[in-house]
Image: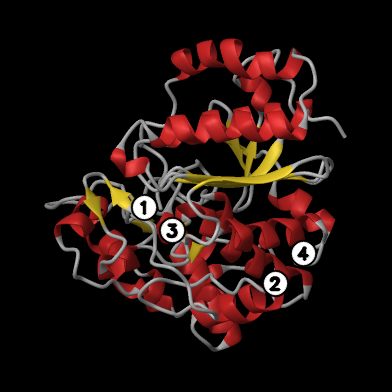
Amino acid sequence: MMLENVPIWGLLGLGVVLVAGGLVWSFARPMTAAQAREALHRRVQAVQRKSPRLAQAQMLVSSPQFSGHFGASAEQPFHVASVGKLFTTVLTAQLVEQGRLRWDSRVVDLLPHETLEHLFVVDGVDYRDEVRLEHLLMHTSGIADYFSDPVQGGKRLMEQAALEPQKSWTPQELLEVTRASQKTRFPPGQGFHYSDSGFVLLGLVLEAIYSQPFEEVVHQRIFGPLGMEHSYFPFRTQPNQPTARLSPVWINSADLSQSPALTVDWAGGGVASTTDDLLKFGQALMEGRLIGPDTLLYLSQPLNRFERVIRYGRGMMRLKFADFFPLLRYPDMIGHLGILGTLLVLDSQSKVVVILSLGSTGHMEDSVRLLIDAVGVLRRVKP
C-alpha cells in the first residue's frame, strides 16, 4: 500500500523522544534478558493503550543475544501492507539471478502492449517503450499510484475501498484506476514517486514468466519452501495450515479485515502473515537462501530519498538511524515499512530482525519509535 503523502514522521517530536529514549538505550549500562523482555513488553503495551485500534499491536525481535515476541499472540495473522513488496522484489531478483530477466529488461517486451496503454504518457508522449524492470522496482518509472494519488472526478482508491467494503478488486481494475483517472508523474528515470501501480505491473510480469497466478507463485516459491504455513492472500488464497482470524485492518476509520475490499492490494502488499512466518523469510534473506548476498546488497543500495531517514533502493528500503539524530549510531537496517504501521527490517551483519504490526493507518511514527527502542535494547543485552 502507498506510503507517500501519508503523515509518517513527527520529526521534531521524534527527535526529542530519541534524546530521551533511544540515545539512553545506546549509552546506558547492559541489560539482562529478563530486563530487556520487561522493557519491550512495557513499550508495546504503551502503544496498545494509545487507541482501541492498536489493541492487536505486536512485535517480534530476534538476534543471537536475545529474541522475544510482544503484544498480541504470535499466532495472530495480520495484513503486512507494503512489507509484501519484499516478496515481489525477491521473486523478480530470483529471475534475474537465473538469467531469465535483466534489471534493464524492457517491460513492453514482457507484457501485452495494451496492458501499458496510457500508463506512461507525459505531455502527449508515450514513454512505455522506455520503462525498464528496475524502474518499477525503484519507483522511478513515473507511473501514478492507484492507491493514494488523486483521482480525477472521484475519491482516492484508499477512501473508495472503505466506502465499498464488499467490492473485490482485480489487478486489471487497479491498473485501470491509474490508466483512466490519474496522470503520469514524469518520464521514466526522471524522478522518484512511490507507486503500487508499478508493483502491479511487476506482479503481471511474474505471472507471464511463470504462466500461473502471482499468488500461486508466491506460495510455491516462498511460502512453501520456507514453511510459512500461516501466510496467504486474504480473499485470494488460503494458508497451508488452519490460521486464526485476521487482525483488524484499520484504513482510516474502517476495519477492512473481513471485507473483500482488502483485495485493493496485490503484488504491492496483499499478504497476511504472522511474525513467526515473517521471521523465517527475514532469516532466509540474511542467510542467502532466497537470493545471493550480492543481489541483496544491490536491491538495498540507497538510491533515492524516500523520507528523512529512509532511502529507497530496488524494491527495498534502507533505514539510516543517524539521520534521526547524529549520535544515534545504530547500523543501517534494510527491509520495508507499510502504511498499517508494519515493518520487517534486518541487519545481516548482526543477524538482527525486527517485525512489527500495529494494524492501523496513521501510526507509522509509533512503529518507528518501537523499532528504535527494540534496536536500542538489543544493543544493551548481555551476550
**Cα distance in 3D space between marks 3 and 4:** 24 Å
Q: Amino acid at mark 1?
A: Asp
Residue located 22% across and 51% down the image: 254
Q: How far across and how far down the image is residue 214, in percent?
A: 51, 78
**Cα distance in 3D space between marks 4 and 2:** 13 Å
Which residue is most to the bottom?
Answer: 211
Residue located 54% across and 69% down the image: 107
Residue located 69% across and 31% down the image: 36
Q: Amino acid at mark 2?
A: Leu
Nearer the N terminus, badge 2 or badge 3?
3
Mark 1 or 3: in front is 3
**Cα distance in 3D space between marks 1 and 2:** 31 Å
Residue 119 lies in quadrant: bottom left
Helix, strand, or loop for circle 2? helix
Q: Which one is nearer the viewer's eye here, 240 or 322?
A: 240
Vertical placement of residue 274 versus 347, above or below: below
Q: How far across and how far down the image is residue 34, in percent?
A: 71, 33
**Which residue is disc 2 drawn over?**
226
**Which residue is disc 3 drawn over?**
79
Q: Amino acid at mark 4?
A: Ile
**Which residue is disc 1 drawn over?**
145
